Image (cartoon, rainbow, N blue to C red):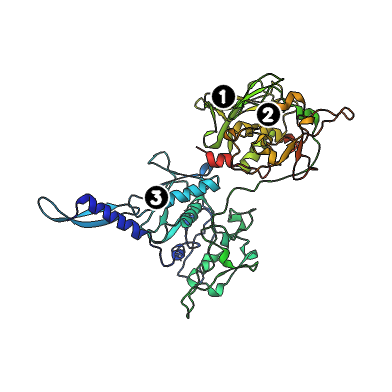
């Protein structure tokens, strides 16, 4: 007779292995004729009155005020109490009698697959998925169940309470499937049901199972969340080539229902392929010479790099112009902002320009996962940026001061340009200068003969171990890159600044100063996407 703990361990192992056996056709578990699109149970912009018993189902799109997108893109979840639970009975030895004893196990649910799906979403998007941990104050959350048929979810956030997301034990626990359903819960709809899908694919209705014709209903433009985003045949929200297909009478295989109009094989639609959901960055590459007076405001000889007052990865400098000593010493007081959220307030004497600040913040919000909010005198927020205007120049500390507030100065006359404000805010977030990267000499040449001797340390290369730009490509058009004439001497004849930064791949390209860049570039915002805590 097996001892109790050995029997339980053996059974748990057997259940875990059997649960991972692939279903005959896992895609069919996302093709439920009673659910809109096959796997959307209801919610945001999901039509009502889908009646599969009718010859021609009635589709009615009615706004549902009880559903919306998740606040700040953060979704919470918990497992249903019975998720994955299988009640096993085993004969055990008992001092008094022999009896069958129940052994519940929750091994059937797959925590590893869920974690992998969540990690993928975190790495590729600004969305966040966290366990609810029985926090009573969190009333909107998803309940992951395994006891119903199929893989399905509600769309968006239920503002009045929890909502179900079902992942049938046998057939739904694949990383791509879990990501697909989690994205539905976030509010994403099917790509192949987009209002403009007929421009990109052909749905062969002859091959579609008559019970599922409503699964290809187009979502009206006024009900879609995909407006302005290019159609993506490789999206994880796009069903595959044979979705909802009839079976061929001869081969018993499904007939193709979705055909790409470009002529490429629809087999290129891989149902588990992850596509980045980050918004596209705008790149503007106009070549104009920078204004001298505005350049100087970001070129302070007492600050590292010209505008970094201290913080993360900033060297301690011995102020000796004949031979400065650069010492990069880790400073535990400074780090990245928690969850990429930074707070600010104006100094009481600041001459403010709310319109420019708002435009800069809007640009950062639209192009990155970073967030900037007013502190609103909240005493619980200890770390925050104080925007001042009474000091000379445009400058900031780098990263978050864990011990209190930190200054960011924007001199009234000369610093209130959208590009300059973005540049300094990104310093405050922890970004360093692109032209001081450890690998910058592979991409640009610094013409030291043209550099003002008072500013030679402004081109000091930041060591790899102190860089916050590791793992991202060098970006000549970054708003964190200084322009072609930065820290230059003046020509004795023309009185204009001499060029100091030359692009190796295109020596005629004149890089813009940050203030002259109207938008952020394609950029390298790996910093916070990979290091959020």
The residue where tag 3 is placed is 111
Could you tell which of marks 1 and 2 lies nearer the N-terminus? 2
- Point out residue 473 in the picture as x, y percentages from the top left corner: 64, 44
Residues at circles 3 and 1 in contact by the CB criterion of under 8 Å: no
Q: Nearer the viewer, residue 278 or 193?
A: 278
Q: Dot 2, crowdedness within 10 Å: few (<14), some or many (≥20)?
A: many
Nearer the camera: disc 1 or disc 2: 2
Could you tell which of marks 3 and 1 lies nearer the N-terminus? 3
Dot 3 lies on which element? helix
Asked whether, in this view, residue 462 is left or right of residue 298, the answer is: left
- Rendering quarter of residue 439: top right
Q: Kindly give the residue lying farthest to the left in the view shown.
A: 96
Q: Residue at x 52, y 24 (%)?
A: 403
Q: Residue 305, labelled with which disc?
A: 2
Nearer the camera: disc 3 or disc 2: 2
Distance CA(mark 3)–CA(mark 2):
47 Å
The answer to whether residue 66 shows anywhere in this view is no
Asked whether, in this view, residue 54 is left or right of residue 445, the answer is: left
The residue where tag 1 is placed is 405
- Point out residue 144 in the picture as x, y percentages from the top left corner: 40, 51
Q: Dot 3, crowdedness within 10 Å: few (<14), some or many (≥20)?
A: few
- Rendering quarter of residue 506: top right
- Rendering quarter of residue 150: bottom left
Dot 2 lies on which element? loop
The answer to whether residue 380 shows anywhere in this view is yes
């Amino acid at each position: 007779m097996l001892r109790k703990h050995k029997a339980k361990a053996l059974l748990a192992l057997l259940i875990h292995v059997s649960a991972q056996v692939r279903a005959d056709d896992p895609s069919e578990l996302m093709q439920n004729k009673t659910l809109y699109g096959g796997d959307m149970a209801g919610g945001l912009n999901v039509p009502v009155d889908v009646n599969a018993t009718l010859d021609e189902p009635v589709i009615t799109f009615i706004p549902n005020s009880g559903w919306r997108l998740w606040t700040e893109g953060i979704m919470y979840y918990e497992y249903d109490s019975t998720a994955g639970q299988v009640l096993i009975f085993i004969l055990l030895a008992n001092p008094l009698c022999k009896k069958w004893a129940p052994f519940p196990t929750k091994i059937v649910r797959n925590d590893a697959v869920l974690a992998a799906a969540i990690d993928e979403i975190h790495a590729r998007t600004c969305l966040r998925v966290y366990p609810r941990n029985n926090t009573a104050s969190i009333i909107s959350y998803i309940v992951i169940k395994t006891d119903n048929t199929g893989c399905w979810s509600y769309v968006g956030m239920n503002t009045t309470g929890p909502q179900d997301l079902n992942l049938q034990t046998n057939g739904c626990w694949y990383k791509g499937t879990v990501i697909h359903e989690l994205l539905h819960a976030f509010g994403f709809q099917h790509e192949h049901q987009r209002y403009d899908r007929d421009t990109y694919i052909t749905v062969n209705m002859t091959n579609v199972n008559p019970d599922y014709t409503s699964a290809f209903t187009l979502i009206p433009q006024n009900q879609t969340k995909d407006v302005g985003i290019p159609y993506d045949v490789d999206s994880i929200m796009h069903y595959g080539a044979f979705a909802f297909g009839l079976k061929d009478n001869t081969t018993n295989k499904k007939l193709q229902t979705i055909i790409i109009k470009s002529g490429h094989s629809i087999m290129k639609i891989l149902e588990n392929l992850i596509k980045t959901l980050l918004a596209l960055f705008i790149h503007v590459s106009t070549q104009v010479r920078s204004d001298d007076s505005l350049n100087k405001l970001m070129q302070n000889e007492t600050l590292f790099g010209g505008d970094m007052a201290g913080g993360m990865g900033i060297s301690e400098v011995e102020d000796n112009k004949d031979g400065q000593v650069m010492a990069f010493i880790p400073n535990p007081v400074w780090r990245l902002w928690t969850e990429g959220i930074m707070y600010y307030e104006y100094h009481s004497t600041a001459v403010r320009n709310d319109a420019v600040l708002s435009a800069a913040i809007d640009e950062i919000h639209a192009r990155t996962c970073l967030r900037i909010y007013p502190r609103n005198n909240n005493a619980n927020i200890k770390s925050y940026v104080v925007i001042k205007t009474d000091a000379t120049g445009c400058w900031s500390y780098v990263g978050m001061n864990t011990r209190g507030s930190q200054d960011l100065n924007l001199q009234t006359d000369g610093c209130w340009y959208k590009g300059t404000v973005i540049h300094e805010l990104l310093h405050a977030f922890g970004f360093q200068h692109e032209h001081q990267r450890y690998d910058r000499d592979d991409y640009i040449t610094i013409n030291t003969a043209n550099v003002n001797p008072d500013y030679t340390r402004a081109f000091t290369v930041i060591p790899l171990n102190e860089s916050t730009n590791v793992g991202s490509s060098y970006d000549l058009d970054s708003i964190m890159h200084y322009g072609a004439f930065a820290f230059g001497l003046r020509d004795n004849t023309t009185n204009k600044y001499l060029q100091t930064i030359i692009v190796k791949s295109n020596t005629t390209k004149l890089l813009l100063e940050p203030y002259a860049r109207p938008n952020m570039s394609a950029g390298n915002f790996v910093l916070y996407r990979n290091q959020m805590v």
